[in-house]
Image: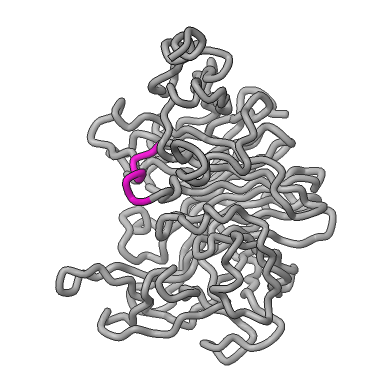
Amino acid sequence: MNAKNFLLSMLAVASIGTGTVMIASPQAHAESTSVTSQPKLTGKYVLQAPDLAKGVKMGFGSSLVHLPGDPDNVFYTSGDRGPNGEVEIDGETRRTFPLPKYTPSIYKIKIEKGKISVLSSIPLQVKGKDPVTGTSKITGLPNVIKHDEVPYDATATKVISYDPYGLDLEGLAYNPKDGTFWLSEEYGPSIVQVKKDGTILQRLVPQGMSAMLNSPAVPLKEVLPASYLNRRQNRGMEAISITPDGKWMFAAMQSPLRNPDKSVDNSRNLRILKIDMATLKPVAEFVYVTENASQFKDLKQSDIVISDLFAINDHMLLIDERDKNAGTKAQIKQIYATDLSAATNILGSYDTPDKFEKTLEQMDMTEFAQQGISIPTKRSVLDAVSFKYPYEKIEGITLLHGRTLVMINDNDFGVGSTSAENGTQLWTFDLPTTLK
């Protein structure tokens, strides 16, 4: 090792601690910093979710967005692939879909007097016929045999149909330039453009996916990196946001890619894409390093994820980073202001071990320093644990006027989730400073 690399490795940040300031080399710089004053909790709003079936509640909260010109108490959110669960049979974990014809939807909601009201729902549909529903409406069933989980019926004994148009929706964004929604989803992973009436216009997929997916009613564009096909099951494209000027779209993976395999499940390195809305092609990719699980009690690294993001501008994001615990067991429920301006663009690099010594997911902070990779800085804007936030899944965040932070939880349709027992809640906070 030469002197320069030795110095970089000595200065590299080997671990992060929430609420600390770390000083490092120019290549591996400060990651987490604390805030000097606290946000103010200004409102809690509850959804009285109706039943969809026995043991199944209406579900949404996977995302949250506010449209320009709408009242400050009106938002849009989405549900994911619908009620589903895991059942163990003969030592095999099977994914069940008790309502296989459930249609993923976008919901317009209003908060008032402590309640969440649903103003309208927008079921997703194609210009044609879905092979499962027999109508234009799609399902939330997996797309591709072997690439996706095997879908079973409610008894977990019968394999049901795959759906090439099925979507497991997570993030929701709005483009003010053309009035369309963009949603990220976990199957592809992919990003879909949707009209306000719910019609799917196109789908951005990883390179190499078109050959796997027979979906003539939805045009496919292979613009996402091929490495994204190595996403971990149920940990795909979780978060998405478009800058207020409509020029840039940011999308983040929930967990590290299984790149090259499962051995990296405990990696701290997640990927964030920056996409040019004029060409719909990625122009940058950044490594986002999650908190170090070893600094917390009984917390696995693989249980620290990104659940949503909000684009303040072309380089500043709010990142929703959380663990998979709820209530008093929760340790990480952070909203970070994340600055990409000095971070290294790694697009096209560290994707395959044959081209580089290691993939991005195999690297640590010392190796980032040795390779000259600068990671985004981040500082805590909101620590929801300090407000005794009761739920596991903060999955939707948005920002109004640079000062009002709004977040919502995913209730998982009341199926197999402790956070769903009390339904869906939306919380609002006033921040001590304006974010620009």
Using the image, determine if residue 262 lies above or below residue 340.
below
Name the residue located 52 percent from the left edge and 52 percent from the top edge: 227
Image quadrant where one finds the C terminus? top right
Q: Is residue 367 above or below residue 195?
A: above
In the rendering, at what x and y percent does residue 318 appear?
60, 36
Quadrant of the image occupied by residue 219: bottom right
Q: Is residue 427 left or right of residue 177?
A: left
Q: Nearer the viewer, residue 189 or 196?
A: 189
Left/right placement of residue 239 relative to residue 278 reads left
Residue 192 is situated, as x and y percent measured from the top left of the image, at 65, 64
- The residue segment tinted magenta is 261-267
Queried whether the magenta region covers residue 265, the answer comes back as yes
The outermost residue toward the right is 177
**Whether residue 426 is visible:** no
Regarding residue 169, the answer to whether it shows in the image is: yes
Question: Residue drawn 49% across and 26% down?
Answer: 368
Q: Is residue 352 above or below residue 205?
A: above
Q: Which residue appears at 43% of the width and 85% of the height?
A: 161
Establish if 4 lies above or below 347.
above
Q: Position of residue 22 (x, y in %)?
A: 47, 14
